[in-house]
Image (tube, rainbow, N blue to C red):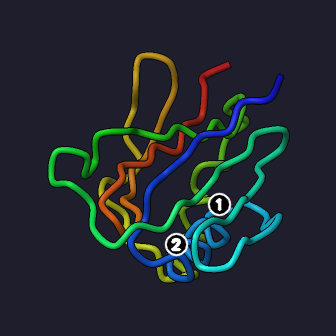
Amino acid sequence: MNLLAMVFVTDLDRSIDFYQAIGLCYVERHGDAWATLRLGDALLGLHQTSTLPSAERGRVKLNFELGGGSGGKLEAFRDRLLAAGVQLHTSIAPQPWGRSLTLVDPDGLSIEIAESAG
């Protein structure tokens, strides 16, 4: 059994570009309705919709784990995001379990990029 996280988006091309900019790999696309991307063993499905209900905007939070804090991983990732034109919602901040930064995708979905302390 595999797990596929699904995100509803209003512009499939824009969202594919965004998720590729943060490191996901394009897998396949089914017309203007659906696209699949991969990060390691995880799959992300993007499902095009004409509008997002306001109650759904930002309701799901995706977390991408960079692994143990070997120093500089999160900074290097942040620099890559900025170079790709991705705007950060928060800067790198300490957490009880490590450090993280937050960005928001083109449809308002909160995404945390995390680096564990160990």
Residue nearest the viewer, comparing 55 with 78: 55
Element type at mark 1: helix
Residue nearest the viewer, comparing 66 with 108: 108
* Amino acid type assigned to the residue bearing label 2 in the image: Ser
Q: Position of residue 30 (x, y in %)?
A: 72, 71
Element type at mark 2: helix
Q: Which mark lies nearer to you, 1 or 2?
A: 2
* Amino acid type assigned to the residue bearing label 1 in the image: Ala
Q: Give the residue at mark 2.
A: 15
Q: Give the residue at mark 1.
A: 76
At a point 73% along the width and 59% down the height, the residue shown is 37
Residue nearest the viewer, comparing 65 with 18: 18
Crowd around label 1: few <14 · some 14–19 · many ≥20 (10 Å): few
In the rendered image of this protein, does residue 99 appear above or below residue 76?
above
- Is residue 110 shown left or right of residue 52? right
Q: Position of residue 73 (x, y in %)?
A: 68, 48
At a point 80% along the width and 29% down the height, the residue shown is 2
